[in-house]
Image (tube, grey):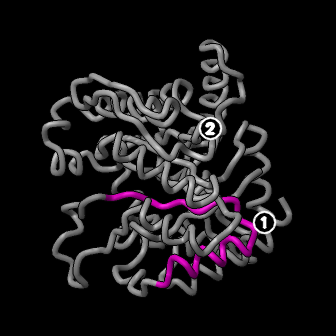
Amino acid sequence: MKFSVALPNAYEGLGYPIGFTRDESTFARLAGIAESLGFDALWANDHLSTPRFLRGAADGPPRFFEPLLTLAHIAATTTRIRLGTAVLALPLRDPVALAKQVATLDVLSGGRVTLGVGLGAYPEELAAAHPEWARSGRAAVFTEAIEALRLVLDEGGGSYHGRSFEFEDVELAPMTSQRPLPIYVGGHTTGAMVRAARWGQGWMPGWRPLPELRERIAALRDRLVATGRDAHAVEVAPELSARVSRDHEDAVRQYETSRFVQHRRSRDRTGRDPALMTASNLVGSPEAILERVAALASAGVDHCAALAFPAETVGELIEQWQLFAAEVLRAA
């Protein structure tokens, strides 16, 4: 089982207090710590614009750092840890420009990039930034964008003619160090799973109750075989949250009262039962978390990805990473 952690680059006001990343050295510092602790990857979240429900806060607007630039910043201070987006809102991006950025980052980082892409958490972002694309619908824009992106990344260029995106005879150089560059498709839904089977090397659902996750992983494997791919060609890497304490009940209490969890519960549009959130993530004593990890592995999960730890300060976040690494990562 792999374990990786989420950077707090675009979580202010959502899971962490505004001002959490006031010190610009935070990301390089966290990257060095995550690498030294043995985590497999660091993942940067993506929000292009401030959501309307966060505007007008007394502490000012949240600082959302662009994910690819943030990863480029920490690529220069790390050597081993993988660098991913979890997930980049693909319908907001021009696929040719994105291919150029990702290929550049992959080459300069020594082939350490994983590109996680999804529809985006908030539909209003697309409507605000690109109303002409929004009229086509996010799913349709995503389909065109990932088709065009795979073409440019895999073939080094080409031509594409779609409703939202169109380009003629472009060429990409330098090419990515990894062939193919791994693209992970984010999303809870069956549609996201189908998109992962078609275009991805990974699937990044959010938390789901274990029986449902097991069923969807089995459906993913069947879908891959039906399309002529190996049943295990796609890594299953759910984005999870975590809170660890040697006192199980203390971990549960800290998790369930955190602003991170309260935000997720208030804004969740996926129909998940909030009562199952604690049991479906990595929360509790090390022993309880290891039992949950074993259950996830048995269901077909390969990677507990982009683990987001509720915290009020960067120091508290580091303490959680250190305790998790010592008590869970090294025992799993």
Q: Residue furthest right?
A: 331
**Tag 2: amino acid:** Arg
Q: Amino acid at mark 1?
A: Val
**Quarter where residue 62 is shown:** bottom left
- Label 1, on which residue? 328
| Span shown in magenta | 25-47
Q: Residue sitting at 60 percent across and 75 percent down?
A: 77
Element type at mark 2: loop
Is residue 295 positioned above or below 217 on the image?
below
Which residue lies under the disc numbered 2? 179
Please report the residue visible at 44 percent of the width from the left and 59 percent of the height from the top: 68
Q: Nearer the viewer, mark 1 or mark 2?
A: 2
Q: Residues within 10 Å of mark 2 (few under 14, many from 20)?
A: few
| Residue drawn at 73 percent across, 77 percent down | 323
Query: First in sequence: mark 1 or mark 2?
Result: 2
| Residue 117 percent across, percent down from the top left | 45, 44
Viewer can see residue 315: yes
Question: Relative to residue 290, is residue 162 drawn left or right?
Answer: left
C-alpha span from label 1 to label 2: 32 Å
Asked whether 35 falls inside the magenta stretch, the response is yes
Residue 134 located within the stretch drawn in magenta: no
Tell me the residue at 21%/83% (across/down): 58
SS class, disc 1: helix
> Residue 46 at what x, y percent from top left?
38, 57
- Pointer 1: residues within 10 angstroms few (<14), some, or many (20+)? some
